[in-house]
Image (tube, grey):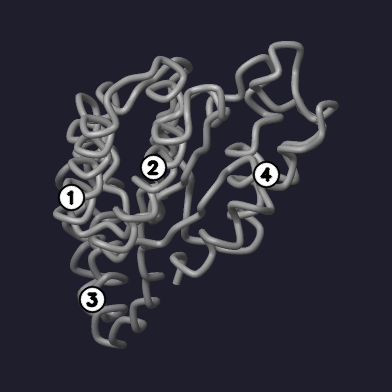
Amino acid sequence: MNVREGVRAASHARHVGPVYAGWLLRMQYAIGACLLLLGMGTAPAMAQPASAKPARTVLIMGDSLSAAYGISNAQGWVALTQERVARKKPGWRVVNASISGETTAGGVARVDAEIKRHKPAVVVIELGANDGLRGLSLVQTKANLERMIKASKASGARVLLVGMRIPPNYGRDYTQGFERNYRDLAKRHDTAFLPFLLEPIMLDRASFQRDNLHPTAAVQPTLRDHVWRALVPLLD
């Protein structure tokens, strides 16, 4: 607003009343200030930070050995792996979908829904121990594991197959066939492979709880380190 316009506004204000006149003058000055700023141009907009990419997921499909049976969840090897992933592999997370008592049949029944829910980039399959302890059909156990592997790979996920062994009292044929299932499937489907989850502790009775089946809290870091060596190459 120039001087002449200001005088004209003041003159007009005397005819419209003091309250309205004051409001009118304030509006005119505000409009003039806005026009001045527009004439000077606007400052360049600050660059917006790129939105963070969603974390990629490692999905663990396991049984009580992965579900921290008999100890707190925070003490289990899966939770310890999540802590290490957070430190060493930012941009990744671990989801534990393990259930105590789970068989390979239970894993097959759940795998599609878990994949759909979590959209994993890596699936770790640690199942079969309960099949072996119940003496279930080796053919069916193998078929169930194979279906889980195929479902995982069909979704675009990489697979780590974690093997298991059972006591020799089930007979040589069953015991060897059980172990061979994992090895054959890993080779056939070109998956990452850990032959035996409990290998670092299997000869130490003190590493197991009273049931002589489930590892104690004290050895969970050892199991984490054992799995980590097979898992970390998949976290690129």
Distance Cα–Cα, label 2 vs label 3: 67 Å
Q: Which residue is mark 4?
A: 223
Q: Compare marks 1 and 4 and give the one earlier in the sequence.
A: 1
Amino acid type indicated by mark 3? Leu
User: In the shown orientation, is residue 80 left or right of residue 67?
Assistant: right
Distance Cα–Cα, label 1 vs label 2: 12 Å
Q: Which residue is mark 2?
A: 125
**Quadrant in which the N terminus is drawn:** bottom left
Q: Which residue is mark 1?
A: 150
User: In the shown orientation, is residue 16 left or right of residue 125?
Assistant: left
Amino acid type indicated by mark 1? Lys
Helix, strand or loop at label 1? It is helix
| Residue sitting at the far bottom | 40
User: Mark 1–mark 2 contact, CB under 8 Å?
Assistant: no
Q: Which residue is mark 3?
A: 35
Residue 31 is marked as none
Residue 164 location (% of width, % of height): 50, 39
Q: Nearer the viewer, residue 126 or 92?
A: 126
Distance Cα–Cα, label 3 vs label 4: 70 Å
User: In the shown orientation, is residue 8 left or right of residue 44?
Assistant: left
Amino acid type indicated by mark 4? Leu
Q: Compare marks 3 and 1 and give the one earlier in the sequence.
A: 3
Helix, strand or loop at label 4? It is helix
Q: Nearer the viewer, mark 3 or mark 4?
A: 4
Local crowd size for mark 4, using a 10 Å CA cut-off: few (<14), some (14–19), many (≥20): many
User: In the shown orientation, is residue 75 left or right of residue 229?
Assistant: right
Residue 117 location (% of width, % of height): 24, 35
